[in-house]
Image (cartoon, coloured by chain):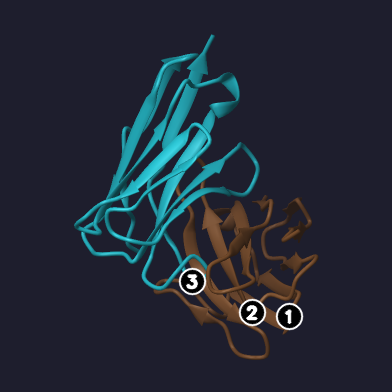
Amino acid sequence: GQQLNQSPQSMFIQEGEDVSMNCTSSSIFNTWLWYKQDPGEGPVLLIALYKAGELTSNGRLTAQFGITRKDSFLNISASIPSDVGIYFCAGSYTGTASKLTFGTGTRLQVTL
Amino acid sequence: GAVVSQHPSWVICKSGTSVKIECRSLDFQATTMFWYRQFPKQSLMLMATSNEGSKATYEQGVEKDKFLINHASLTLSTLTVTSAHPEDSSFYICSATRTYNEQFFGPGTRLTVL
């Protein structure tokens, strides 16, 4: 099936640094979502975006829905050790309750 | 609220046996449930969409006779992996939808087939 391309694939950063990751698709989505998955657990929703150009924040996280509707980015400011995990973007054609296409994932590791 | 559980959390079985995984929405009625499979260090891949009282819709390449899905009520969907083989070993995750804009994921079930 289709997958969304995320970059970078993995990153090592120091505590306190800002992080940026993005997600691109060959097709248009109407909803973009960002999830975090800890090892051995299901993904947890971080941010949902519903309109092209929309910029939404959730604490230290900020995400934007690209104007072309084919991309999205996620920023994490002032990273902390508990930010460690895998971040997935996901796209949907008809909303967050509909079937999702997931990105390839960005593995984040934070060093003290 | 909006908790989704899965049972079992992990299972080890012999090749050729069948395994049933349950997905329950604990505090809400789910209009739709989805089943995903995730191989190590890979992303989640949608296997099928399940609606209560109707047949599941499988994604291309997913064998419906091998992965049987039953959605008997608005709070329970089951995935049965029939005649499991080592290549079916994976992390199986379900999700449940409550309203148009809410989808909640379960904690996953790790299946190991020996």
Q: Quadrant of residue B32?
A: bottom right
Q: Is residue B59 left or right of residue B93?
A: left
Q: Is residue B52 left or right of residue A22?
A: right
Query: What crowding class fits label 3: few (fewer than 14 Cα within 10 Å), some (14-19), or many (20 or more)?
Result: many
Q: At numbered mark 1, what does the secondary structure look like: helix, strand or loop?
A: loop
Q: Mark 3 falls on what kind of element?
A: loop
- Where does the image place residue B43, in percent across and percent down from the top left? 45, 49
Q: Amino acid at mark 1?
A: Leu
Contact, mark 1 vs mark 2 (Cβ under 8 Å): yes
The residue under label 1 is B74
Q: Colour of chain B?
A: brown
Residue denoted by label 3: A98
Query: Quick one: label 1, few (<14), some, or many (20+) residues within 10 Å?
Result: some
Q: Which residue is mark 2?
A: B31
A67 to the left or right of A17: left
| Residue pictured at 47% horizontal, 14% vertical | A16
Chain for numbered disc 3: A
Residue A102 in the image: above or below residue B103: above
Name the residue at 41% across, 39% down. Answer: A62
Tell me which label, 1 or 2, sits earlier in the chain: 2
Q: Residue furthest bottom?
A: B54
